[in-house]
Image (tube, helix red, strand yellow):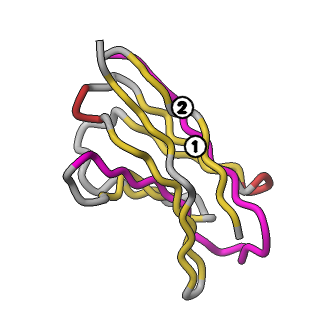
């Protein structure tokens, strides 16, 4: 299984970005895809996840600036990020879990700066 993420870049505070991640290979149809991020000097944290049935989880983000979605037919997960802040600067990693397997994408850098 391979995960290919894209969509990162430099954006000004208050701007938006949309991350995409496509999984390829042998993928069990019941799975969870998600986005994690890791800022410099900090631990990797879960941003959002979504099951193949469409259930979402946003563990630490009480204000819904980010929205996760997926296209099961394309094995693709998206992260729409709005109202970005400098503290959102991090490497964002795509993740896929099914059965006992756990796969990571290569990461895409998001920099929020004026």
**Which residue is located at x 59 percent, y 78 percent?**
98
Is the Cβ of the residue at disc 1 closer than 8 Å to that at disc 2? yes
The crowding category of the residue bearing disc 1, from other C-alpha atoms within 10 Å (few below 14, some 14 to 19, many at least 20), is many
Query: Residue, x 65% and y 75% (percent of image)?
Result: 30
Q: Which mark is residue 78?
A: 1
Q: Is residue 20 left or right of residue 48?
A: right
113 to the left or right of 53: left
For the residue pair 113 and 85, the one nearer the viewer reads as 113
**In the depicted structure, whether residue 87 falls above or below residue 95:** above
Local secondary structure at mark 1:
strand
Residue at 30% across / 19% down in the picture?
A: 113
Report the disc number at residue 92: none
Q: Does 65 appear above or below 21?
A: above
Q: Nearer the viewer, residue 9 or 16?
A: 9
The residues tagged by marks 1 and 2 sit, at their Cα atoms, a distance apart of 7 Å
Q: Residues within 10 Å of mark 2 (few under 14, many from 20)?
A: some
Element assignment for label 2: strand
Is 44 left, or right, of 101 in this rendering?
left
- The span picked out in magenta is 14-40
Question: How far across and down, in percent of the image, does residue 21 sit?
Answer: 63, 48
Give how far across and how far down residue 1 sits, in percent. 71, 70
**Residue corresponding to mark 2:** 18
Determine the residue positioned at 40% across, 26% down: 82
Please tell me which of labels 1 and 2 falls first in the chain: 2
x and y percent of residue 69 in the render? 57, 46
Is residue 21 covered in magenta? yes
């Amino acid at each position: 299984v391979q995960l290919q993420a894209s969509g990162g870049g430099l954006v000004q505070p208050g701007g938006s970005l949309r991350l995409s991640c496509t999984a390829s290979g042998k993928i069990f149809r019941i799975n969870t895809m998600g986005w994690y991020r890791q800022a410099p000097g900090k631990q990797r944290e879960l941003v959002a996840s979504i099951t193949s049935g469409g259930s979402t989880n946003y563990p630490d983000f009480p204000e819904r600036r980010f929205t996760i979605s997926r296209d099961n037919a394309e094995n693709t997960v998206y992260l729409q990020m709005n109202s970005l802040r400098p503290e959102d600067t991090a490497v964002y990693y795509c993740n896929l879990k099914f059965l006992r397997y756990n796969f990571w994408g290569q990461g895409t850098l998001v920099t929020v700066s004026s």
